[in-house]
């Protein structure tokens, strides 16, 4: 596979059906696409899947990624450019293994890449790296963000300019091992195990003005049902697993996430960045492969869902490819459920 500065044509910009729900790039495996519009262009910050030959387990050890490539496109359906290695695990002084789903942000002339990776004690932390270009190369801070843990950072810029980081993931993402604010290596391998208690919550924290640290203690993101009761651990079809994302539409906050072992991308809405968020339904039905992971962005008066599946590798769960499709908000504010394949 060509690893650097590969350019390829996805399809003509106006022939929607030709590129929607197709792998955006076929030269490398990509997953967990966090898309952003910077300078009127779409930039995608994905994981870069590789064959590591690590045996598969519930911890996700076989997801042993080692670098990030950033992709860009001028228009949906236009040329997709792979800008080559933007950050390599060997250049992160505190990193041990497994570079998982990243995200990015821009403030005051600097681009920030946020990334989860296990430290040398095999504990997931979240790091930050900076660049003057949206495509890197990115220079990592010497230490992880203080107070950070677990995986899947998603950085949301509110309309008032304030940035928030949402994060967390259970099972291999280790969130259940942090239940009392300290890492417990002997903690549960999966959910909390307390089936009738509230499910483990994703986390949120305001970012500091310089974007390198949390500006406040980490808070729980509560996901509740229509009666305002927290979703329970046993509610695997609706409870949070990983893949946080936030978007704002018509003044409402939409928190979306993967339900993991039931493979849905679900969403819940709230009135402010902290929630609580009321469960609304499914955005994306299960895709080919175990994981499901999304980002949602507006671009030139349409909304798009970026996601992944395992079409290219014919179902190998750790070798994924990113895709794009249109997302529609209905007049009542709910989102049309997407099934990525013809029914
Ligand atoms: O890519 C590794 C992990 O798989 C991500 O961090 C999760 O969201 C899942 O997609």
Image: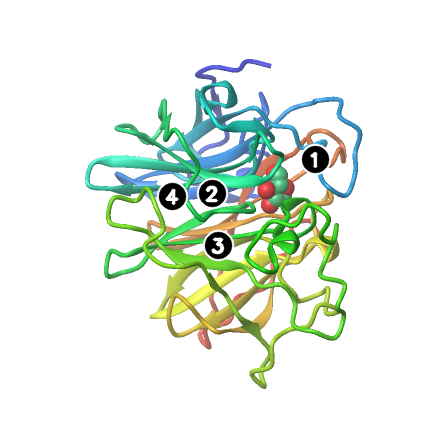
Q: Mark 1 points at which residue?
A: 311
Instruction: Name the quarter showing ligand 1.
Output: top right
Does residue 92 appear to the left or right of 118 in the view shown? left
Dot 3 surroundings within 10 Å: few (below 14), some, or many (20 or more)?
many
Q: Are marks 2 and 3 in contact (CB under 8 Å)?
A: yes
Dot 2 surroundings within 10 Å: few (below 14), some, or many (20 or more)?
many
Specify the quadrant that holds the C terminus. bottom right
Can you name the residue that lies furthest to the left here? 108
Q: Disc 2 and disc 3: Cα gap in Å?
A: 9 Å
Element type at mark 2: strand
Q: First in sequence: mark 2 or mark 3?
A: 2
Dot 1 surroundings within 10 Å: few (below 14), some, or many (20 or more)?
some
Above/below status of 93 relative to 168: above
Q: Name the residue under label 2.
A: 34
Q: First in sequence: mark 4 or mark 1?
A: 4
Q: Which of marks 1 and 2 is in front?
A: 2
Q: Do the residues labelled 4 and 2 touch (CB within 8 Å)?
A: yes
Does residue 310 appear to the left or right of 275 in the view shown? right
Q: First in sequence: mark 3 or mark 4?
A: 4
Q: Name the residue under label 3.
A: 245
Q: Disc 4 and disc 2: Cα gap in Å?
A: 7 Å
Quarter of the figure with residue 39: top left
């Amino acid at each position: 596979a060509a690893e650097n500065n590969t350019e390829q044509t996805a399809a003509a910009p106006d022939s929607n059906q030709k590129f929607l729900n197709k792998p955006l790039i076929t030269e490398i495996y990509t997953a967990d696409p966090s898309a952003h519009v910077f300078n009127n262009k779409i930039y995608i910050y994905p994981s870069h899947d590789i064959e590591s030959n690590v045996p598969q387990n519930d911890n996700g050890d076989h997801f042993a990624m080692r670098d990030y490539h950033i992709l860009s496109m001028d228009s949906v359906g236009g040329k997709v450019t792979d800008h080559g290695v933007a950050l390599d695990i060997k250049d992160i002084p505190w990193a041990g293994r497994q570079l998982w789903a990243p995200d990015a942000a821009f403030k005051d002339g600097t681009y920030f890449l946020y990334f989860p990776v296990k430290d040398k004690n095999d504990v997931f932390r979240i790091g930050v790296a900076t660049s003057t270009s949206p495509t890197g190369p990115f220079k990592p801070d010497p230490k992880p963000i203080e107070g950070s843990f677990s995986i899947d950072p998603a950085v949301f810029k509110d309309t008032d300019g304030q940035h928030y980081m949402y994060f967390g993931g259970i099972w291999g993402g280790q969130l259940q091992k942090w239940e009392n604010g300290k890492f417990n290596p002997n903690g549960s391998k999966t959910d909390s195990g307390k089936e009738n208690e509230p499910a483990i919550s994703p986390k949120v924290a305001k970012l500091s003005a310089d974007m390198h640290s949390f500006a406040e203690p980490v808070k729980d993101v509560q996901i509740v049902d229509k009666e305002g009761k927290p979703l329970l651990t046993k509610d695997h079809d609706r409870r949070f697993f990983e893949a946080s994302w936030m978007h704002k539409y018509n003044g409402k906050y939409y928190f979306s996430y993967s339900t993991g072992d039931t493979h849905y991308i679900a969403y819940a809405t709230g009135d402010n960045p902290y929630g609580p968020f009321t469960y609304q339904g499914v955005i994306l039905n299960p895709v080919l492969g175990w994981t499901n992971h999304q980002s949602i962005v507006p671009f030139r008066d349409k909304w798009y869902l970026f996601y992944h599946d395992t079409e290219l590798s014919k179902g190998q769960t750790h070798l994924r490819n990113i895709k794009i499709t249109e997302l529609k908000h209905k007049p009542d504010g709910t989102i049309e459920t997407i099934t990525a394949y013809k029914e």
